[in-house]
């Protein structure tokens, strides 16, 4: 990767962008292959698998269209008006390491590699050991799209061994995974004094206010809670319901949850697939059993479905989950959601914020202004009003990432591209420099500068 990176970086950004556009077309034209693989390796339903293909195609096109302009030099006013010309130049870091989890094995590996490649970096991806084939499929599409050999490498294997070797070898790390591993990666990057972005866990809330359109809210909540069977950093695990509408909302919500179809068919006949592994099934089951042992009540689900396949688990809704149950604060990362009743918007905001995480939230209300005001009070990287996570994570012109223990840095938008660059300020001085000013001697220099700074403030000049 290091050997071929300079040639790749020397290409015009538009040439690099053309590769991304061709990838966009290939992902759509070869989707049947990608959908089968995502279903077989990651256990997704076909609809959820398509969401993932879209989450590669959409940023590929957005970065290809907008990236070259974002990477262009920026001109700034310099210290001496007109005579100091300052340019901000965006250099690639060199080799970027992308360490990805299993839940969105394309979006979080190739999807994050795309802006890094566009910025002129070579990339080494460490996929999760459970979903390496999905990543390799996308890498083969990128080769077909014209990416030069060697610019994108995949190293497969155990996280603690191979992941940490990647952090040792690269110039920037883009990590997505649990907050626990994120802390290890951050410490390791700190030792090497390299930058990193960390996209970590969540314990997200969805609030249904007293004035919400309950049918829309129930339909959106089902998508929000059970997308990818809840194995999704931005999905909802806490449903905050205003007491005035809680029962009416639950009638609608539970009815929809009961009608969700689980299955392993390689077609669109099912809504939900299965969990990633027997270990993960064990964790989800343990969270539900612990919740019930602590007095929570099961409203629906709560059962594994070995009749459908070894890791199927029903979408599950719990009521009355006490604060000391494991899943009250910890991320389950499965199809399990707990219902809470609140008596005011302020209580909902306070509960949404009462977690170490700060990734995503959703608010449902007919009063759009109120929704937007409440959204600003919730400490998460993204908040959707009257929609589920699809709308926020699909609005890729804007950044996405976590507050608090949910991460550092952002994917998407300009920030999601420029994180893969190192800025350099280049000043070119024309005609006269600072010599004449300093030639006055230190005392007069200080007086002249003080006068000039005061004048700039009084006259509101855009200087320096
Ligand atoms: P994980 O942290 O166990 O693993 C993530 C990746 O890190 C894997 O490739 C793993 O092999 C590797 N890894 C493990 N130990 C490592 C080490 N010491 N050094 C370097 N790499 C190492 O996470 P997971 O269980 O696979 O994924 C689920 C978690 O990811 C959840 O907490 C979820 O919320 C989070 N997630 C966050 C986002 C986001 O954008 N914020 C997106 C998806 C998933």
Image: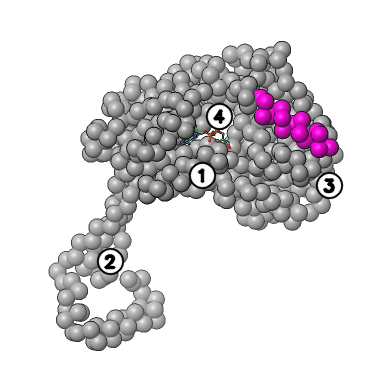
The circle on residue 78 is 2
The circle on residue 243 is 3
Scheme of image coloration: one colour
Which-is-in-front pick, marks 2 and 4?
A: 4
Q: Earlier in the sequence, mark 1 or mark 2?
A: 2
In which image quadrant can residue 17 be found?
Answer: top left
Mark 2 in CB contact with mark 3 (< 8 angstroms): no
When the figure is inspected, residue 321 is found, relative to residue 102, above or below; the finding is below
**Residue bearing mark 4:** 103
Mark 1 in CB contact with mark 4 (< 8 angstroms): no
**Residue bearing mark 1:** 183
Q: Residue shown at 72%/50% (left/top)?
A: 351
How many angstroms separate mark 3 from mark 1 (CA)?
Answer: 38 Å
Which-is-in-front pick, marks 3 and 4?
A: 4
Q: Residue shown at 19%/79% (left/top)?
A: 438
Which-is-in-front pick, marks 1 and 4?
A: 1
């Amino acid at each position: 990767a290091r050997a071929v990176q300079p040639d790749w970086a020397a290409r015009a950004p538009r040439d690099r962008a053309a590769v991304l556009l061709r990838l966009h077309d290939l992902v759509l034209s070869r989707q049947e292959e990608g959908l089968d693989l995502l279903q077989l390796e990651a256990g997704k339903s076909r609809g959820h698998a398509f969401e993932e293909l879209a989450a590669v195609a959409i940023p590929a096109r957005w970065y290809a269209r907008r990236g070259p302009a974002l990477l262009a030099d920026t001109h700034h006013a310099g210290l001496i008006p007109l005579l100091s010309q300052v340019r901000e130049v965006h250099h690639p870091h060199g080799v970027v390491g992308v360490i990805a989890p299993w839940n969105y094995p394309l979006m979080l590996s190739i999807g994050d590699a795309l802006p890094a490649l566009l910025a002129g970096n070579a990339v080494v991806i460490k996929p999760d050991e459970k979903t390496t084939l999905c990543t390799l499929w996308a890498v083969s599409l990128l080769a077909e799209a014209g990416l030069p050999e060697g610019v994108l490498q995949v190293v497969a294997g155990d996280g603690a061994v191979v992941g940490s070797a990647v952090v040792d070898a690269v110039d920037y790390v883009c990590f997505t995974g649990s907050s626990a591993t994120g802390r290890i990666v951050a410490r390791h990057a700190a030792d090497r004094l390299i930058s990193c972005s960390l996209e970590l866990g969540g314990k997200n809330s969805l609030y249904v206010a007293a004035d919400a359109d309950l049918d829309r809210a129930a339909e959106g909540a089902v998508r929000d809670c059970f997308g990818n069977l809840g194995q999704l950093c931005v999905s909802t695990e806490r449903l905050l319901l205003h007491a005035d509408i809680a029962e009416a909302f639950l009638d609608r919500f539970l009815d929809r949850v009961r009608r969700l179809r689980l299955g392993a068919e390689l077609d669109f006949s099912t809504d939900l697939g299965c969990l990633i592994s027997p270990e993960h099934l064990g964790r989800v089951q343990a969270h539900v059993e612990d919740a019930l042992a602590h007095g929570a009540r099961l409203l629906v689900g709560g059962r594994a479905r070995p009749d459908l396949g070894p890791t199927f688990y029903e979408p599950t809704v719990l009521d009355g989950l006490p604060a000391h149950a494991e899943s009250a604060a910890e991320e389950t990362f499965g199809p399990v959601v707990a219902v809470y009743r609140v008596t005011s918007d302020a209580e909902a905001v306070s509960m949404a914020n009462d977690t170490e995480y700060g990734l995503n939230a959703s608010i449902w209300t007919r009063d759009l202004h109120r929704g937007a005001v409440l959204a600003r009070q919730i400490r998460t990287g993204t908040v959707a009003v009257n929609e589920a996570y699809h709308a926020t994570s699909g609005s890729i012109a804007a950044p996405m990432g976590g507050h608090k223990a949910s991460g550092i840095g952002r994917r998407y938008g300009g920030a999601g591209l420029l994180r893969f660059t190192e800025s350099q300020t280049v000043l070119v001085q024309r005609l006269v420099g600072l010599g004449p000013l300093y030639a006055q001697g230190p005392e007069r220099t200080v007086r002249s500068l003080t006068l000039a700074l005061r004048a700039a403030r009084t006259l509101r000049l855009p200087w320096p």
